[in-house]
Amino acid sequence: GENVEQHPSTLSVQEGDSAVIKCTYSDSASNYFPWYKQELGKGPQLIIDIRSNVGEKKDQRIAVTLNKTAKHFSLHITETQPEDSAVYFCAAQMNRDDKIIFGKGTRLHILP
Amino acid sequence: GAVVSQHPSWVICKSGTSVKIECRSLDFQATTMFWYRQFPKQSLMLMATSNEGSKATYEQGVEKDKFLINHASLTLSTLTVTSAHPEDSSFYICSAVEASSHEQFFGPGTRLTVL
């Protein structure tokens, strides 16, 4: 089955700097790659997603890149703000209505 | 936007008792719902897939007799933890797939503590 690896497990960046989280997946049949933000005691919240036929997608300060050949995808957050502090999960699915296989998560700390 | 609710948001029970957790899609119909479990500082792990009107499909290693799932309507799925033990203490999260758009939405989670 699908396996998603995520790095780093913890990331601290100065406010205003950029943060990058990287993931790899194992199943070439996966076609949909969402990213979730989870705050303490809450359910995950979808922040951006990308499909396998797209190489890059951007939404304001957040961007995601996908290298389908290498089975790599990454999340980029620019101009980080204190409210970006949270746990971020990458994930892979066959389609967006399928079960979600999550990475282990990255705890992002934005330092003042 | 589409909203998924869970009830209760937290529950404390004694070892050996059963606990029912509800997952509702408030403003859309969900043919499929998923149940996940999340231990502290860990990722979400899929427990089972719940389809309306049919038996749930459980992931490997998840005991179907211990975690009873019922998807009786297009807006409600329930997870019952039977004979709960302290090792079942966890954060249980559901997600629901909107029938028309196929988008998936998460509930806020239920914190279960078994004493």
Image: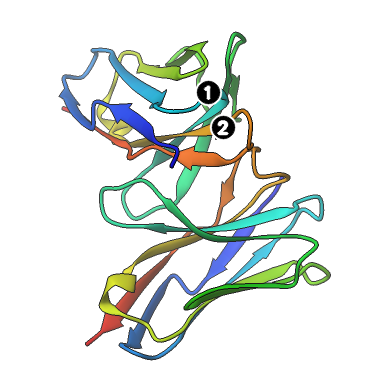
Q: Residue at x 35, y 86 (%)?
A: A13
Q: Nearer the viewer, residue B12 or B10?
A: B10
Residue indicated by mark 1: B29
Chain to which the residue tagged by mark 2 belongs: B
Q: Is B21 in front, or is B90?
A: B21
Confirm whether circles 1 and 2 share one chain: yes
Mark 2 or mark 1, which is nearer the start of the sequence? Answer: 1
Disc 1, SS: loop
Q: Is residue A34 above or below residue A79?
A: above
> In which quadrant of the rendered view does residue B101 lie?
top right
Amino acid type, callout 2:
Glu
Is the residue A85 above or below the residue A94 in the image? below
The residue positioned 34% from the left and 13% from the top of the image is B82
Q: Position of residue B96 (x, y in %)?
A: 51, 32
Colour convention: rainbow
Residue B49 percent across, percent down from the top left:
58, 26
Amino acid type, callout 1: Gln
How crowded pointer 1 is (Cα within 10 Å; few <14, some 14-19, many 20+) is rated as some
- Which quadrant of the structure image shows residue A108? bottom left
Residue B67 circle label: none
Mark 1 and mark 2: span between their CA atoms?
A: 6 Å
**Image: A47 above or below B63:** below
Q: Residues within 10 Å of mark 2 (few under 14, many from 20)?
A: many
Residue at the spot 28% in from the left edge and 24% down from the top edge:
B85
Mark 1 touching mark 2, by CB under 8 A? yes
Describe the element under mark 2 as helix, strand or loop.
strand
**Numbered marks: total:** 2
Res. A26 image quadrant:
bottom right
Q: Is residue B31 left or right of residue A45?
A: right
Any mark on residue B98, and which? 2
